[in-house]
Image: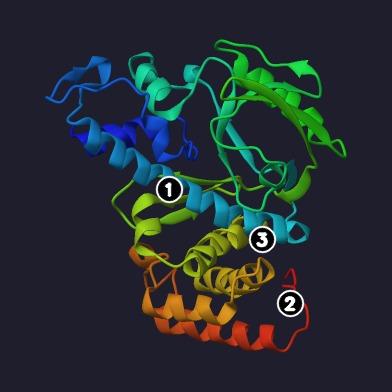
């Protein structure tokens, strides 16, 4: 396994976006071997510290970008989603989530520990507005102290589920050795979390509960407006219950139509969304077939029509059909 595969393995074990620590966080990390060395059960090859850190930073940035775009979509379109949840735009992790042989790397390079710590904070979220940051250790929620060890994440999720249904909550965190607290106001968002899966193929899909987008697709779509349309397309499939129906062109075109409205409601310029899609029609490229997927020309026509509909509305809202 080469260094890139090793990074992918580290980040895939958590199945969700990883911590977006600043580059300076690496300064105090243990020096990794500068010659290839086998790493425990994974058989991973660790090459140079600089290369390792550079690749890790790339994946951190990729996950942060997806979380930022996704949170905008999920929060702006909550009233269009039959499945909702309360959120502050925060993801946490613990070292127990990682395989034992990878835990030293998780601790040194991701800042993860036995107790819950912040993996990432979505831009524009209640957590960001309250001043929470990646790397913060969560000490307590509403004076309920967190626990360490293998059950720490489950305990956090149980407390989170209860506290997020309240009008506000108090987060007590430790940062750089100092303990402080912040009041956070949860908000309602669409209940379809968005995750990155690490793959060299271009793909995005939903199982009706969560949305998944490949790392290669994120890389290729450089503009956030285009990324928003792709995530919004899968959000439409989930919200409209398309995953429980036989795939066909009608469903795909309906998801395309709704994706324009969802993106517009989240503040993405629909004209830019259309321009980006026209130049880079990546979504579902590998799945296009005569029977189940429309042609690029058919899809563009629907997107164009949706743009015209949006321009005629003061406050665009997609209708449920």
In terms of sequence position, does the residue under pointer 2 or pointer 3 come before the other?
Answer: 3
Pointer 2 with pointer 3, Cβ within 8 A? no
On the question of residue 206 being in view, the answer is no
Quadrant in which residue 76 is drawn: bottom right
10 Å crowding of disc 3: few (<14), some (14-19), many (20+): many
Residue depicted at x 68% and y 49%? 125
In terms of sequence position, does the residue under pointer 2 or pointer 1 come before the other?
Answer: 1
Image quadrant holding the C terminus, namely bottom right
10 Å crowding of disc 2: few (<14), some (14-19), many (20+): some
Q: Which mark is residue 61?
A: 1
When the figure is inspected, residue 157 is found, relative to residue 85, above or below; the finding is above
Front position in the image: 127 or 91: 127
Give the foreground label among 1 and 3.
1
Q: Residue 240 carries which label?
A: 3
Please state the horizontal and vertical placement of residue 217, each as a whole percent of the image. Answer: 37, 58
Give the foreground label among 2 and 3.
2
Q: Give the CA distance from mark 2 to mark 1.
A: 31 Å
């Amino acid at each position: 396994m080469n260094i890139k595969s090793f990074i992918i393995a580290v980040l895939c074990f958590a199945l969700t976006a990883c911590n977006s620590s600043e580059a300076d966080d690496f300064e105090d990390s243990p020096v990794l071997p500068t010659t290839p060395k086998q790493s425990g059960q994974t058989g991973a090859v660790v090459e140079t510290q600089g290369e390792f850190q550079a690749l890790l930073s790339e994946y951190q940035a990729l996950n942060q970008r997806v979380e930022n775009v996704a949170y905008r979509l999920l929060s702006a379109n909550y009233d269009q989603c039959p499945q909702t949840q309360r959120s502050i735009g925060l993801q946490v992790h613990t070292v127990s989530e990682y395989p034992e042989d990878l835990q030293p790397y998780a601790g040194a390079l991701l800042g993860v520990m036995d107790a819950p710590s912040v993996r990432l904070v979505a831009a524009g979220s209640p957590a960001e507005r309250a001043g929470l940051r990646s790397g913060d250790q969560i000490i307590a929620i509403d004076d309920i102290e967190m626990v360490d060890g293998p059950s720490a994440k489950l305990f956090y999720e149980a407390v989170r589920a209860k506290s997020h249904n309240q009008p506000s909550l108090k987060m007590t965190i430790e940062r750089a050795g100092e303990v402080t607290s912040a009041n956070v106001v949860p908000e309602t968002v669409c209940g379809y979390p968005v995750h990155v899966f690490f793959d060299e193929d271009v793909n995005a899909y939903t199982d009706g509960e969560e949305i998944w987008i490949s790392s290669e697709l994120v890389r290729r779509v450089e503009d956030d407006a285009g990324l928003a349309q792709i995530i919004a397309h899968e959000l439409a499939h989930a919200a409209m219950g398309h995953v429980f129906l036989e795939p066909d062109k009608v469903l795909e075109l309906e998801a395309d139509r709704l994706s324009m409205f969802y993106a517009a409601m989240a503040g993405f310029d629909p004209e830019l969304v259309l321009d980006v899609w026209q130049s880079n029609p990546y979504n579902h490229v590998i799945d296009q077939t005569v029977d189940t997927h429309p042609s690029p020309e058919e899809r563009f026509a629907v997107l164009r029509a949706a743009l015209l509909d949006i321009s005629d509305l003061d406050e665009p809202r997609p209708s449920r059909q």
